[in-house]
Amino acid sequence: MTRKTSLYFLGFLFSLAFFIQCSQEKTEAVKSEISWIENMDQALVSAEDLGKPLMIDFTATWCPPCKKMEDSTFSNLDVIKKSLNFVTVRIDVDKQGDVANKYQSNAGKYGGIGIPNILFLNSDGEEILHPIGFKGPEEFLAIMDSALTLANQ
C-alpha cells in the first residue's frame, strides 16, 4: 500500500469509529428516559397483548412534587430499566381529566386524591397498587417490584 492509500484507509477507520461511537451514544440516550404512552386505550391493548402490567403516572405541569418525581425518580437509570417491565402511561390530569376521574386519580383541586400518584394495573386492567405522593428512586423501585410480584400472581 502506498502512503497516500494508507492515510485514506486510516482516515476511513477513524471516521467509522467515530460513527459507531455516536450511534452507541444515541442508543444510550434513547434508553435514558421512560417511554410514556399518553393514550389509555392504546396502553390497555398493549398491556394485554404483551402480558405486561401498566404503570400509569397521573401528573400535571403545575405540580411541584410531580416535577420533583420527574427530575429524581423517573430519571433514575434503575427506575428507567425496571420500567421496561411495564407498559408506561402518563396522564396529564388537566388535559385528560376524564381518564383521571375514571381511575380516581385526579388532582386534589379537582376533587381527587392528589398528585403525583401512580396507578399499577395488571395486564387485564385490574388495580394492583396505587401509591400517592412523591416517591424517591429507592422507594419507587421497591413499589415497582411489589407491583410486578402482584401482577404475576
Image (cartoon, rainbow, N blue to C red):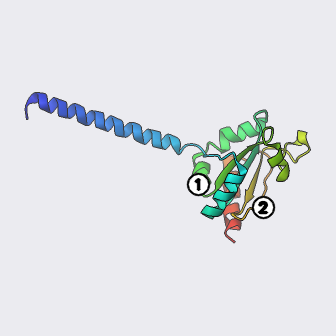
Q: Is residue 69 left or right of residue 114?
A: left
The quadrant where residue 152 appears: bottom right
Residue occupying the far top of the picture? 4
Secondary structure beneath label 2: strand
Q: Which residue is mark 1?
A: 84
Q: Which residue is mark 2?
A: 127
Who comes first in sequence, dot 1 or dot 2?
A: 1
Most foreground residue, 60 or 50:
50
The quarter of the rendered structure image containing the C terminus is bottom right
Residue 116 numbered mark, or none: none
Q: Is residue 84 left or right of residue 98?
A: left
Q: Amino acid at mark 1?
A: Leu
The quadrant where residue 32 appears: top right
Secondary structure beneath label 1: loop
Tell me where residue 45 appears, x and y as whole percent: 67, 58
Residue occupying the far right of the picture? 111
Tell me where residue 126 appears, x and y as whole percent: 76, 63
Q: Amino acid at mark 2?
A: Glu
Tell me where residue 1 appears, x and y as whole percent: 8, 35
Residue lying at 67% horizontally and 60% vertically, measured from the top left: 53
Most foreground residue, 84 or 44:
44
Q: Residues within 10 Å of mark 2 (few under 14, many from 20)?
A: some
Tell me where residue 146 appears, x and y as whole percent: 70, 62
Residue lying at 73% horizontally and 60% vertically, measured from the top left: 121
Q: How many marks?
A: 2
Residue lying at 76% horizontally and 46% vertically, measured from the top left: 58
